[in-house]
Image (cartoon, helix red, strand yellow):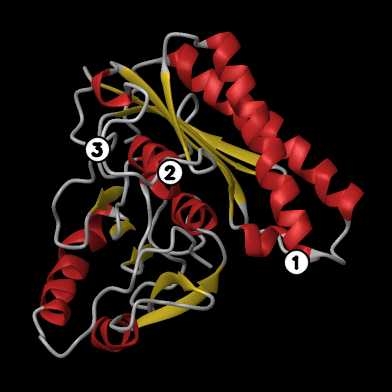
Amino acid sequence: MPQPNPSDSDARLARHLAARAGELLLRVRAEHGHADPAALKAAGDRAAHDLLRSELAGSRPDDAVLSEEDADSRRVGERAGRLGADRVWIIDPLDGTREFSEAGRSDWAVHVALWARNASTPHGLVAGAVGLPAQHRVLATDVPPPTPEPGDQPGGPIRVAASRSRPPVFLTDLAEEVGAQLVPMGSAGAKIAAVVTGEVDAYIHAGGQYEWDSAAPVAVATATGLHASRIDGSPLRYNQADPRLPDLLVCRQDLAEPLLAALRRQLSDSTTTATRPATGRDS
């Protein structure tokens, strides 16, 4: 069953911010067009970042913020007191810039999550929202989606969301071992959203990410009743000194044990390259 949301007002704010930023991104996309993808990416990133920062400064002035678009977000060490803060908003104003810049693609997202020091869960996330603007929907912890059921074809292949361009090098072998079907998708948020809605059964990533790539989707996924962990089964932890969080598994609870066992077997092979340098982008 979905877990109760510990902070309704924060969750409603997360939904509101993800929706507002998504509407703005759709306007930016329409106004700029797709002739210059680099300019479109930059314009979208900056517009959504500025909106979210401004809204949070007005609504939650005492909270810290960790954003992909802050210039020093990747620095190891304390940033603007966030490590000592009791509440930190972790945001990705535009997850999936490549997809955002491609005409017709809808697999990009806006991430808004709240980490709290007094949270009862290991990951510390107490609210979150994933906006999917081109899909005209927001998934959020204020009204978590129902727990996804197993696929329509019992005994059929496990559907695993995979990167369009740079899936982990071990993923093909793992898919063969467990009888999985790899489903290429764009941004990390879109992939985890697809697990939340039951369009796929799992998402496995080990190619390099940061906290803002997964915080909001993980908040929604766990509120929905899904499993979320590192690929070795250890907890995902947020608001760390080093914001890199390079791997994760999100899946239905019934798939967690067999997928983690398969991952252990794949990663125990010393000849398998399990990770690549962190890029922060997943597409």
Residue receiving disc 2: 212
Question: Is the C-beta separation of discs 3 and 2 under 8 Å?
Answer: no
Residue 53 drawn above or below residue 258: above
Residue 266, percent across and down? 17, 81
- Residues 230 and 176: in front is 230
Residue receiving disc 3: 240
- At x 66% / y 45%, what residue is drawn? 45
Q: Amino acid at mark 1?
A: Glu
Q: Amino acid at mark 2?
A: Trp
- Residues 50 and 22: in front is 50
C-alpha span from label 3 to label 2:
12 Å
What label does residue 102 carry, if any? 1
Q: Amino acid at mark 3?
A: Gln
Q: Residues within 10 Å of mark 2 (few under 14, many from 20)?
A: many
- Screen quadrant of the N terminus: top left
- At x 38% / y 78%, what residue is drawn? 156
Q: Quadrant of residue 278?
A: bottom left
